[in-house]
Image (cartoon, rainbow, N blue to C red):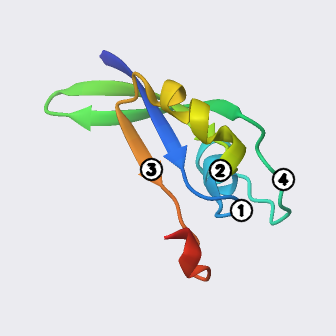
Amino acid sequence: MISIAKKVCLLGDLAVGKTSLVSRFVYNLFDDKYVSTIGVKVSRKTVIIPRAGDIVELTMMLWNLAGNEEFDRVRASYLRGAAGAVLVCDLTRPETL
């Protein structure tokens, strides 16, 4: 078995659904109430991926970054070391694109 750990950041405006996506993916829960993220919240999800006669255990550290403008000046420091990012928008609010 191969074990890999990667940091993935979720980015987007306020109230676009970043926290809901993480909650559903990591905990298989969904709550339609809005709770604002303050700063950053880190969650962990491990998935098993079969690969050519082997198994990869991928552990993702999901960094849910606050979407408020006050957080803009420190956001870059949280992105450091990330292997990827998920950009989230709300298609019912074009200003979030």
Marks 3 and 4: in contact by CB < 8 Å? no
Relative height, residue 4 to residue 18 (above, below): above
Marks 4 and 1: in contact by CB < 8 Å? no
Q: Residue type at mark 1?
A: Ala
The quarter of the picture where residue 38 lies is top right
Marks 2 and 1: in contact by CB < 8 Å? yes
Marks 2 and 3: in contact by CB < 8 Å? no
Disc with the residue nearer the chain's start (2 vs 4):
4
Q: Residue type at mark 2?
A: Gly
Label 1, residues with CA under 10 Å away: few <14, some 14-19, many ≥20: some
Q: Which residue is mark 2?
A: 67
Q: CA distance from mark 3 to mark 1?
A: 15 Å
Disc with the residue nearer the chain's start (1 vs 4):
1
Q: Mark on residue 35? A: 4
Q: Secondary structure at mark 2?
A: loop
Q: Secondary structure at mark 1?
A: loop
Q: Which residue is mark 3?
A: 86
Label 3, residues with CA under 10 Å away: few <14, some 14-19, many ≥20: some
Q: Residue type at mark 4?
A: Val
Q: CA distance from mark 4 to mark 3?
A: 19 Å
Q: CA distance from mark 3 to mark 2?
A: 13 Å
Front in this rendered view, residue 80 or 34: 80
Q: Secondary structure at mark 3?
A: strand
Q: Is residue 65 left or right of residue 58?
A: right
The quarter of the picture where residue 44 lies is top right
Disc with the residue nearer the chain's start (3 vs 2):
2
Taking the spot 65% from the left edge, 53% from the top edge, the residue there is 24
